[in-house]
Amino acid sequence: MLSWLTHDNSTPLIDVFTHASSDMVDFHLSCVFRALHSGANYIRIQDDTLTGDAASVDIATIENLDNLANIGDELLKKPVSRVNLDSGCNENAYQMTNEKALIKLAGILSKEKKIRDMRSPQGKIPNMK
């Protein structure tokens, strides 16, 4: 009975609530982006398989931080996945890694920022060096 509260350095009951909340945010944002015809611009990179120290938010040892950096590097190499709004399951979105998708999104955001700066009442914003 107590294993629902704590088991193998994890907290299963709390994990259920946090994962459900995270999944609902992902689902709702996917719906919003699709409704705005911007589904290709929504990217969410998340690893639900973290366990032990890697899953803890309060273990800031050098070893754990290095491990998290390695996990992040591996996530960048994985293909972009997205929630299927009909089935609720994650599936590969298109033939691109998370890293390439982030680079593409950074380009889109950079262009949008330049356009907004040009349209601002202050006019063109000078380059800051």
Image: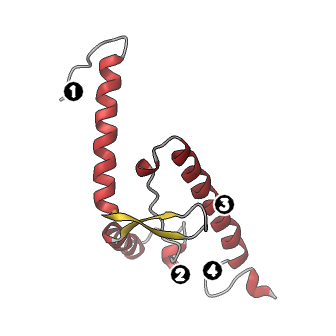
The nearer-to-camera label among 1 and 3 is: 3
Please report whichever mark, 1 or 3, sits nearer to the chain's N-terminal start: 3
Label 2 secondary element: helix
Label 1 secondary element: loop
* Residue ID at (33%, 66%): 76
Give the spatial CA distance, label 2 vs label 4: 7 Å
- The crowding category of the residue bearing disc 4, from other C-alpha atoms within 10 Å (few below 14, some 14 to 19, many at least 20), is some
Q: Position of residue 114 (x, y in %)?
A: 29, 28
Give the spatial CA distance, label 4 vs label 3: 18 Å
Q: Which mark is residue 10?
A: 4
Q: Which mark is residue 52?
A: 2
Give the spatial CA distance, label 1 vs label 2: 44 Å
Apparent side of residue 55 relative to residue 41 in the rendered image (left or right): right
Give the spatial CA distance, label 3 vs label 2: 21 Å
Give the spatial CA distance, label 1 vs label 3: 40 Å
Q: Which mark is residue 21?
A: 3
Q: Which quadrant of the figure contains the N terminus?
A: bottom right
Q: Which quadrant of the figure contains the C terminus?
A: top left
- Is 125 situated above or below 51? above
The nearer-to-camera label among 3 and 2 is: 3
Q: Which mark is residue 128?
A: 1
Please report whichever mark, 4 or 3, sits nearer to the chain's N-terminal start: 4
- Is 106 situated above or below 58? above
- The crowding category of the residue bearing disc 1, from other C-alpha atoms within 10 Å (few below 14, some 14 to 19, many at least 20), is few
Please report whichever mark, 1 or 2, sits nearer to the chain's N-terminal start: 2
Inspect the image, locate mark 4, and give the three-letter code of the amino acid beneath it. Ser
- The crowding category of the residue bearing disc 2, from other C-alpha atoms within 10 Å (few below 14, some 14 to 19, many at least 20), is few
Inspect the image, locate mark 1, and give the three-letter code of the amino acid beneath it. Met
Q: Position of residue 60 (x, y in %)?
A: 46, 68
The nearer-to-camera label among 4 and 3 is: 3
Q: Are marks 2 and 4 in contact (CB under 8 Å)?
A: yes
Give the spatial CA distance, label 4 vs label 1: 47 Å
